[in-house]
Image (cartoon, helix red, strand yellow):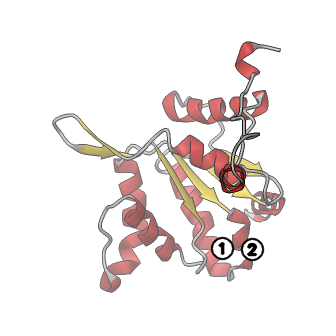
Amino acid sequence: MSRRSTQRFADMSQASVPERLDFIKAGAIFETSARRAFKDHLKDMVIAPTPSDEKLVFLTGPAGMGLSSLLAEFSGQFPLAAHGETGLLSAPVINEHIHPSGEIIDYCDELRASLAIPGYGPMVRQVSFQKTLHLLGALNTRVVILEDFHQTYNFKKHQMVAYQNFVHHLISKYDIRVVLSGAPQIWRWAMDDE
């Protein structure tokens, strides 16, 4: 076994009960070779994307498998930042949960809020979708992660189609890679989508 795969955890044998509980709640992540390989693959999609790279990635697994933790850890490596004298903002990786309302406009507004970028207000929300797509292109976004994508199957047809269109536009118009994570039924999206 290589030295890189060795992982050490804190010795909690002499810790108090509250300290042990806090340690357990914080979670222990085993950095396996498979986990590293997947993060490396995502990193390659951000740093050196090539035309042959997959532009749509499905990350599926049962609840509690740690997909959200992995994606949060990965996306945290690429925070929103201002560059140089221009002050231009860049966000190489965007990681957002599907909005529970099912409305793509709500998703776009929450995304802009998480990036600390003003939205358009209730009177002009109908333009928020296209403006958000344009914004992601301007921010030099390379990967957009949509977590819990399986939730779209609880939405009305027009809501599901709106999210499908969002993914299509990211890939085709802005050359942004998309990662869909969630329960295994997200595969149905690829099978049902024309």
Q: Which residue is mark 1?
A: 160
Label 1: few (<14), some or many (≥20) within 10 Å? many
Numbered circle sitting on residue 185 = none
Percent position (x, y) of residue 35? 73, 35
Quadrant in which the C terminus appears: bottom right
Describe the element under mark 1 as helix, strand or loop: helix
Percent position (x, y) of residue 111? 45, 64
| Above or below for 49 versus 60 | above
Q: Residue at x 78, y 31 (%)?
A: 34
Question: Disc 2 marks which amino acid?
Answer: Tyr
How far, Cα to Cα, is label 2 from label 1? 7 Å
Q: Of residues 27 and 32, which is closer to you in this image?
A: 27
Q: Of label 2 and label 1, which has the lower sequence position?
A: 2
Q: Is residue 87 left or right of residue 185?
A: left
Question: Disc 1 marks which amino acid?
Answer: Met
Which of the two marks, 2 or 1, is nearer to us in this view?
2
Q: Residue extending furthest bottom? A: 123
Percent position (x, y) of residue 159? 61, 78
Q: Which residue is mark 2?
A: 153
Q: Residue at x 36, y 56 (%)?
A: 135
Q: Residue at x 73, y 14 (%)?
A: 3
| Above or below for 38 versus 80 | above
Q: Are marks 2 and 1 in contact (CB under 8 Å)?
A: yes
Q: Residue at x 46, y 40 (%)?
A: 78
